[in-house]
Amino acid sequence: MKLRDLPELGLSSNMTPQERKDFAAEVAAAIKESETCLSSDEQQWVRLAIVKQEQSIKLRQAIIEKSLTSLIWSALAGMGYLLLDFARNGFK
């Protein structure tokens, strides 16, 4: 959407730079003054959903970390078993 497409808002393609700057400042002020479109219950729900998502991400990371750690320990235990078996029996 371009400025020339919005004559109903008082915008025109022949606005001076100062008029555009003033209009942008008015729009920014109006946005800051306006209340949120969500009710307090909806805002609380959104906050809780964000917290739940953060917890889910942390849980996934913990599961991955623990899985990799157990895989490494299993590999070390397997190599230890092989060394112990080799020490007892040698090459046959």
Image (spheres, rainbow, N blue to C red):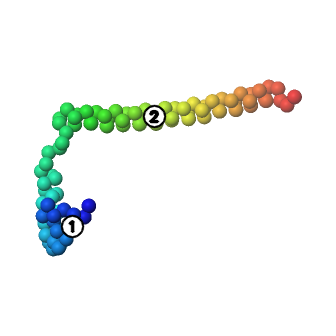
The amino acid beneath tag 1 is: Arg
The amino acid beneath tag 2 is: Arg
Q: What percent of the width, then of the height, locates residue 25?
A: 15, 62
Q: Which residue: 51% across, 35% down?
A: 64
Q: Is residue 18 above or below residue 1?
A: below
Residue at the spot of label 1: 4
Residues marked 1 and 2 touching at CB (< 8 Å): no
Would you say 8 lies left or right of 46 here? Answer: left
Between circles 1 and 2, the one closer to the viewer is 1
Q: What percent of the width, then of the height, locates residue 80?
A: 69, 30
Q: Which residue: 19% across, 39% down?
A: 38
Q: Is residue 14 above or below residue 29?
A: below
Q: What percent of the width, then of the height, locates residue 73?
A: 60, 31
Q: Which residue: 77% across, 27% down?
A: 85
Q: Quadrant of residue 89?
A: top right
- Assign a secondary structure to mark 2: helix
Residue 60 bears which disc, if any?
A: 2
Q: Quadrant of residue 58?
A: top left
Of residues 4 and 74, the one nearer the viewer is 4
Would you say 64 lies left or right of 34 here? Answer: right
Of residues 88 and 13, the one nearer the viewer is 13
Q: Which residue: 26% across, 61% down?
A: 1
Would you say 74 lies left or right of 14 here? Answer: right
Of residues 51 and 28, the one nearer the viewer is 28
Q: What percent of the width, then of the height, locates residue 42?
A: 22, 35
